[in-house]
Amino acid sequence: MSAPLISVRDLTLKMNGRVVLEHVTTDIAPDEIVTIVGPNGSGKSTFLRALIGAVPPASGHIERAKGLRIGYVPQKLAIDASLPLTVERFLGLPKRITTRKAADALEKAGVPDLHDRQMSALSGGQFQRVLLARALLENPQLLLLDEATQGLDQPGAAAFYQQIEEVRSDMGCAVVMVSHDLHVVMAASDRVLCMNGHICCAGTPEIVASAPEYRALFGSGTKGTFALYRHQHSHDHEHDHTHEHSH
Amino acid sequence: MLDDFLIRAALAGLGVALCAAPLGCFVVWRRMAYFGEATAHASILGVALALSLSLPILPAVLVAALIMAMTVSILTGRGYAMDTVLGVMAHTALAAGLVAVALLSDIRLDLMGFLFGDILAVSRSDLAVIWGGAAVVLGLTWWRWSALLTATLNPDLARASGIDPRREELGLTVALAIVVAVAIKVVGVLLIAALLVIPAAAARPLTRTPEAMAIWAGVLGGLSALGGLWAAFWLDAPTGPSIVCTAALLFILTTLGGALRRN
């Protein structure tokens, strides 16, 4: 097996002094699709932000391969209405690119012909694809997606993940994504990390889906997205508690 | 008809308007209009301290403005919302500055000159300071433009591209402090924030890219400076406020124009 793109060793992360994720150890291999699932506030997004270096480790290590090129698609990107921005100019941040290159990236992301539009005039699906196009520009070895289908309807989300698959097979990059769309995402991934303040369970989608820790979080149905789930998972770092989430 | 002092005034106004324009765009995009205000108000405290300690005014103002900017950055996100922190700091700095000036009774200080500017009294050395400061600010903005714009869009996006958003913000803060320091003579501490925000806001309806907005903000800011000076001269009105009123008039025109074009 080739050297991992990122290795994470016994990583603990804090936000505002509170531990949100602890003792995470994992490797991201080239080419693999890793999906991170878990309830709200389980530390998924913070983990992704730690991978790009936006959150310093409270303890433990994150080691990136030398010169690792990361394409990052954030959870939310609120562009202030006072900022005029065409799609092409957005793609050219921070490094200016040629119209040709912008068109190529948009094509790959499945939204050709948008380059002259204002970012604020895009639909939710178009916007996410433009974010994807920008992440693809640097020819990334690792693509990080933080709930990239938030705000998309089911067919929109499914189409988006299909696009990710195509991009992966096209460019041969590894993909790490955080998602709520359990059944859609898990089918497409090589490995699933189930997080809830720590890694509850990990492995292939089949292994994770049948793990008791996973079932405790998401129920045993495949339509996890719509399930009203009750979380009674005990932690070694916190007292037992119950969360109720509705989706 | 253009006397020497009017030419100097026009050049001073243009210099400030040009360097305020691109920064004003960032102030608008990042929603930090009151950040500019607080920085400006802190400078009156700097003026008072400089006079009492017989220090040169410009560096004192720069330091006061920078300290204010840093304090606001540090306090924000520690239990208070940004606007509360700014509301406390901006007015405290202004009030403390006014008290300090009053206590230094042995010094003859033209307070109105600092509050509202005195563009007609701009000297050759003032001009050198203004254009020097403008050159530094424009150079800094030009150099960091793309990184700062990326960090403004989203700090995490910037990090993923290898940009440190905090460093870019620090650069922006320093540039703002410089603009405040050089603009005191032209519009005074009470109206500096207006010169940052209004031309940028007026440029918004005219533009489709960030760069175009910065350039148009410069054009409209320059027009405001010259138009305001002209109006003040003929109407015998105070210059600083006239410049700001002209900018406001341009804002109304472009906003109406933008609304008409959309319909």
Image (cartoon, coloured by chain):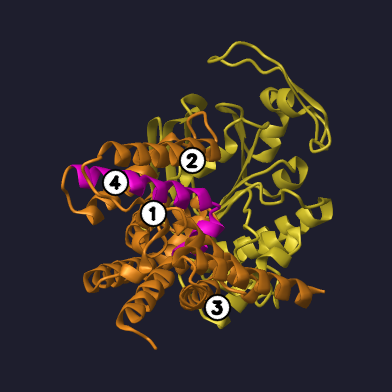
Chain colours: A yellow, B orange
Label 4 environment density (alpha carbons within 10 Å; few <14, some 14–19, many ≥20): many
Give SS at disc 4: helix
**Is residue B12 left or right of A208 when viewed as pictured?**
left
Residue type at tag 3: Lys
Q: Which residue is mark 1?
A: B112
Residue at x 51% of width, y 55% of height: B157
Is there CB contact under 8 Å for labels 2 and 3?
no
Q: Using the image, tell me which numbered label, if any, was put on residue B46.
A: 4
The part of the chain drawn in magenta is B23-52
Seen from the viewer's position, the closer of residues B96 and B168 is B96
For marks 1 and 4, give the one nearer the viewer.
1
Alpha carbon distance from label 2 to label 4: 18 Å
Mark nearer the N terminus (2 vs 4): 4
For marks 2 and 3, give the one nearer the viewer.
2
Q: Is residue B207 visible?
A: yes
Alpha carbon distance from label 1 to label 4: 16 Å
Magenta segment includes B69: no
Is there CB contact under 8 Å for labels 1 and 2?
no
**Is residue B260 left or right of A95 when viewed as pictured?**
right
**Is residue A8 left or right of A113 when viewed as pictured?**
left
